[in-house]
Image: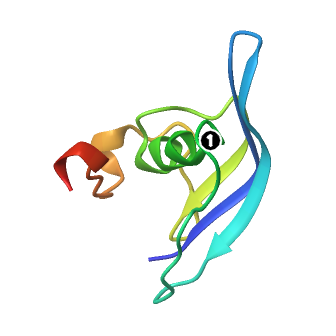
Amino acid sequence: MSIELRNVSKRFGATVAVDRVSFTVREGELVALLGPSGGGKTTVLRMIAGLEMPTEGDLFIRGRRVNDVPVQARNIGFVFQSYA
Protein backbone atom coordinates (compact mmCIF):
# COMPACT_ATOMS: atom_id res chain seq x y z
CA MET A 1 0.00 0.00 0.00
CA SER A 2 1.30 3.49 -0.79
CA ILE A 3 0.48 6.63 1.20
CA GLU A 4 1.15 10.20 0.15
CA LEU A 5 0.53 13.47 1.95
CA ARG A 6 0.80 16.70 -0.05
CA ASN A 7 0.98 19.93 1.94
CA VAL A 8 -1.40 18.57 4.58
CA SER A 9 -2.37 20.87 7.45
CA LYS A 10 -4.73 20.43 10.37
CA ARG A 11 -6.00 23.22 12.57
CA PHE A 12 -8.17 23.02 15.65
CA GLY A 13 -9.52 26.55 15.92
CA ALA A 14 -6.47 28.84 16.17
CA THR A 15 -4.16 25.93 17.05
CA VAL A 16 -2.06 24.53 14.20
CA ALA A 17 -1.52 20.83 14.90
CA VAL A 18 0.06 19.92 11.53
CA ASP A 19 1.53 22.50 9.16
CA ARG A 20 2.03 21.67 5.46
CA VAL A 21 3.39 18.14 5.87
CA SER A 22 4.39 16.28 2.69
CA PHE A 23 5.82 12.78 2.39
CA THR A 24 5.39 9.57 0.43
CA VAL A 25 5.48 6.01 1.73
CA ARG A 26 5.92 3.59 -1.15
CA GLU A 27 4.53 0.08 -1.12
CA GLY A 28 6.75 -2.19 0.98
CA GLU A 29 8.45 0.64 2.90
CA LEU A 30 8.46 0.81 6.69
CA VAL A 31 8.27 4.31 8.16
CA ALA A 32 8.37 5.81 11.66
CA LEU A 33 7.09 9.24 12.66
CA LEU A 34 9.40 10.79 15.23
CA GLY A 35 9.09 14.09 17.05
CA PRO A 36 8.41 15.80 20.34
CA SER A 37 5.22 15.49 22.32
CA GLY A 38 2.57 17.71 20.75
CA GLY A 39 4.37 17.71 17.40
CA GLY A 40 1.41 16.38 15.38
CA LYS A 41 2.43 12.73 14.93
CA THR A 42 -0.85 11.30 16.22
CA THR A 43 -2.85 13.85 14.24
CA VAL A 44 -1.07 12.77 11.04
CA LEU A 45 -1.88 9.12 11.77
CA ARG A 46 -5.50 10.00 12.58
CA MET A 47 -5.81 11.82 9.23
CA ILE A 48 -4.35 8.85 7.35
CA ALA A 49 -6.82 6.54 9.10
CA GLY A 50 -9.73 8.90 8.44
CA LEU A 51 -10.45 9.77 12.07
CA GLU A 52 -9.60 13.42 11.32
CA MET A 53 -9.94 15.31 8.04
CA PRO A 54 -7.18 17.65 6.80
CA THR A 55 -7.91 21.37 6.95
CA GLU A 56 -5.74 21.82 3.83
CA GLY A 57 -3.79 19.64 1.42
CA ASP A 58 -4.36 16.24 -0.11
CA LEU A 59 -4.01 12.71 1.22
CA PHE A 60 -3.66 9.73 -1.13
CA ILE A 61 -3.86 6.00 -0.37
CA ARG A 62 -2.96 3.63 -3.20
CA GLY A 63 -2.95 6.65 -5.55
CA ARG A 64 -6.55 7.60 -4.71
CA ARG A 65 -7.35 10.93 -3.05
CA VAL A 66 -9.09 10.06 0.22
CA ASN A 67 -9.69 13.43 1.90
CA ASP A 68 -13.44 12.81 1.97
CA VAL A 69 -13.42 9.00 2.16
CA PRO A 70 -14.88 7.77 5.49
CA VAL A 71 -12.77 5.75 7.90
CA GLN A 72 -14.64 2.49 7.25
CA ALA A 73 -13.89 2.67 3.51
CA ARG A 74 -10.10 3.15 3.84
CA ASN A 75 -8.99 -0.34 4.99
CA ILE A 76 -6.46 1.17 7.39
CA GLY A 77 -5.60 -0.39 10.75
CA PHE A 78 -4.91 1.78 13.77
CA VAL A 79 -3.79 0.69 17.25
CA PHE A 80 -3.75 3.27 20.01
CA GLN A 81 -0.55 3.37 22.06
CA SER A 82 -2.36 2.46 25.27
CA TYR A 83 -3.45 -0.85 23.65
CA ALA A 84 -0.17 -1.67 21.89
Task: Name the quarter where the C terminus is drawn.
Answer: bottom left
Of all residues, the one furthest to the front in this rendering is 36
**Residue 58, above or below 11:** below
Relative horizontal placement of residue 83, taking residue 77 as reference (left or right): left
Residue assigned mark 1: 40
Residue 14, located in which quarter of the rendered image?
top right
Relative horizontal placement of residue 53, taking residue 22 as reference (left or right): left
**Residue 34, above or below 31:** above
What residue sits 34% from the left and 41% below the top?
71
Q: Which amino acid does label 1 sit on?
A: Gly
Task: Name the quarter where the N terminus is drawn.
Answer: bottom left
For the residue pair 56 and 17, the one nearer the viewer reads as 17
Secondary element type, mark 1: loop
What residue sits 38% from the left and 37% below the top?
70
Residue 64 picture location, percent across and down: 56, 61
Residue 28 picture location, percent across and down: 46, 89
Answer yes or no: is residue 4 visible.
Answer: yes
- Marks counted in the figure total 1
What residue sits 70% from the left and 48% below the top?
58
For the residue pair 83 and 9, the one nearer the viewer reads as 83
For the residue pair 64 and 52, the one nearer the viewer reads as 52
Relative horizontal placement of residue 13, taking residue 70 as reference (left or right): right
Of all residues, the one furthest to the bottom in this rendering is 28
